Image (tube, rainbow, N blue to C red):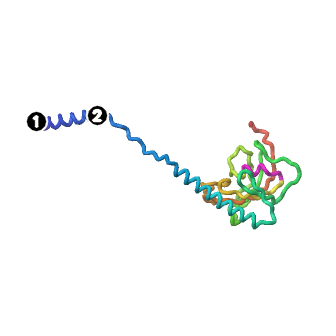
Amino acid sequence: MRIKIILLIGGVFFFMSCSQQQQARKPISHTSGTFIKESIERNKILIADEEDLIAEIIKKDSLKSYISSNKGYWYKYETKIEENTPSPKRGDIAFFDYEIKDLKNKIIYTMTETKPQMYYVDKENIMMGLRDGIKLMKKGETVTFLFPSHMAYGYHGDEKKIGTNEPLICTVSLKEIKVDTQAKN
């Protein structure tokens, strides 16, 4: 008899718990925006510090004239072609060599390590600064670019030799520009 009473009481509790609707738990949301605001402030400080380092390099290299790009990097001509010849444009194939150094002028990648490059202009994913800088060059020119980290490899680095948020010096020699006859813009 006790077992029947226990089963009856257990059944009643079971039935009552199933018939009650349970409220879904809502996620806790923090939308104060402080994380984003702090991240923006950190990035502003990082960029300002990198620009100060680059300004020091430019100041010390008083024999060369640097140009400030509208994309946030600086460059100087090692070899400049004065003739009115074309620069690479979207769809062209640019053949170039380049070397990468840190801001202390220590070589990270030699021209031999980076191999001669073949780049379909604006159709391949390369370092953001190079993507823009190559379009400023003419065949036969050599240009040294000073890229803040956001124009180089950014937060991730290259996952090999280039670290997180590392500004770079890239010396690029544009060897050839060809029109891509296979292009389907």
Principal SS element in the magenta part? Answer: helix
Work out whether residue 127 can be spotted. Answer: yes
Q: Quadrant of residue 7?
A: top left
Which numbered disc, 2 or 1, marks the residue closer to the eye?
Answer: 2
Identify the residue at image location x=33%, y=36%: 22
| Dot 2 and dot 1 residues touching (CB under 8 Å) | no
In terms of secondary structure, where does tag 1 sit? loop
* Residue 133 point in image, percent of width and height: 75, 52
Region of the chain picked out in magenta, as a range: 131-139
- Give the mark, 2 or 1, whose residue is nearer the N terminus: 1
Residue closest to the eye, 160 or 170 = 170
- Does residue 171 lie above or below 180 as drawn? below
Residue at the right extreme, as displayed: 83
Look at the image and tell me in which quarter the C terminus lies. top right
Residue closest to the eye, 80 or 57 = 57
Identify the residue at image location x=82%, y=51%: 138
In terms of secondary structure, where does tag 2 sit? helix
95 is within the stretch colored magenta: no
* Residue 173 point in image, percent of width and height: 79, 56
Q: In this view, does 177 lie to the left or right of 15?
A: right
**Which amino acid type is marked by label 2?**
Cys
* Alpha-carbon span between mark 2 and mark 1: 26 Å
Work out whether residue 112 can be spotted. Answer: no
To which residue does mark 1 refer? 1
- Does residue 164 lie above or below 32 as drawn? below
To which residue does mark 2 refer? 18
Q: How crowded is mark 2: few (under 14 residues within 10 Å), some or many (20 or more)?
A: few
